[in-house]
């Protein structure tokens, strides 16, 4: 299984948090549009052209052994693009509350991941369990 260093995953999460906070701070949804482009380009290129990962590679030199499966990272990026898309569509329709809700959910998920709990990983686990025909107990 292919792996990606966690320092690159964290760099992407920090970028997401910063851009969403800047969008909120300046009340400017166009910043979310820039974040959407960064995430889509990263998703299409398999992470190679993600701006935040590129900055992380230049700045974060280290030999950290912690990694994350590429498949899981891709799933998390898809979730980020979905939430950004929903936020941007909402803002374009002047549904401010929905736009802030979707971007706020992304902000919370990326912040939680930086603190050590990956919401996307949990969703991925549930998804894989359902595909395998297993019941999910709560």
Image: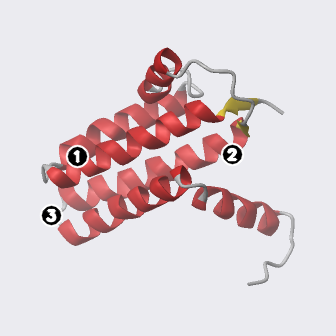
Q: Nearer the viewer, residue 94 or 65?
A: 65
Question: What residue is disc 3 on?
Answer: 94
Please state the total of marks drawn on the protein image: 3
Rendering coords of residue 110 (x, y %) = 47, 53
**Does residue 63 sit above or below 136 in this rendering?**
above
Q: Secondary structure at mark 1?
A: helix
Q: Secondary structure at mark 2?
A: helix
Q: Dot 2, how many residues are within 10 Å of its Cα: few (below 14), some (14-19), or many (20+)?
A: some
Q: Secondary structure at mark 3?
A: loop
Which-is-in-front pick, marks 3 and 1?
1
Rendering coords of residue 36 (x, y %) = 36, 40
Between marks 2 and 3, how big is the CA–CA gap? 33 Å
Q: Nearer the viewer, residue 137 or 57?
A: 57
For image coordinates 47% across by 19% down, the residue present is 59
Between marks 3 and 1, how big is the CA–CA gap? 19 Å
For image coordinates 63% across by 41% down, the residue present is 73
Left or right of 3, for residue 79:
left
Question: What residue is disc 2 on?
Answer: 72
> Which of the marked residues, 1 or 2, is nearer the chain's N terminus?
1
Rendering coords of residue 94 (x, y %) = 15, 64
Question: What residue is disc 1 on?
Answer: 22
Q: Dividing the image into 4 quarters, which one contains the C terminus?
A: bottom right
Which-is-in-front pick, marks 2 and 3?
2
**Does residue 96 sit above or below 52 in this rendering?**
below
Left or right of 23, for residue 138:
right
The quadrant holding residue 96 is: bottom left
As drawn, the residue found furthest toward the bottom would be 138
Rendering coords of residue 2 (x, y %) = 78, 30
Which-is-in-front pick, marks 1 and 2?
1
Between marks 1 and 2, how big is the CA–CA gap? 27 Å
**Does residue 122 sit above or below 27 in this rendering?**
below
């Amino acid at each position: 299984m292919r792996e990606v260093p966690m320092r690159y995953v964290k760099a992407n999460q920090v970028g997401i948090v910063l851009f969403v906070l800047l969008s909120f701070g300046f009340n400017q949804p166009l910043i979310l549009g820039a974040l959407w482009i960064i995430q889509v380009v990263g998703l299409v290129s398999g992470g190679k052209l993600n701006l935040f990962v590129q900055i992380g590679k230049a700045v974060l030199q280290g030999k950290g052994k912690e990694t994350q499966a590429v498949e899981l990272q891709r799933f998390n990026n898809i979730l980020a693009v979905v939430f950004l898309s929903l936020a941007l569509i909402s803002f374009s329709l002047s549904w401010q509350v929905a736009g802030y809700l979707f971007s706020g959910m992304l902000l919370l998920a990326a912040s939680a991941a930086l603190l050590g709990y990956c919401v996307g990983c949990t969703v991925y686990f549930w998804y894989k369990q359902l595909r395998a025909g297993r019941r999910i107990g709560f």
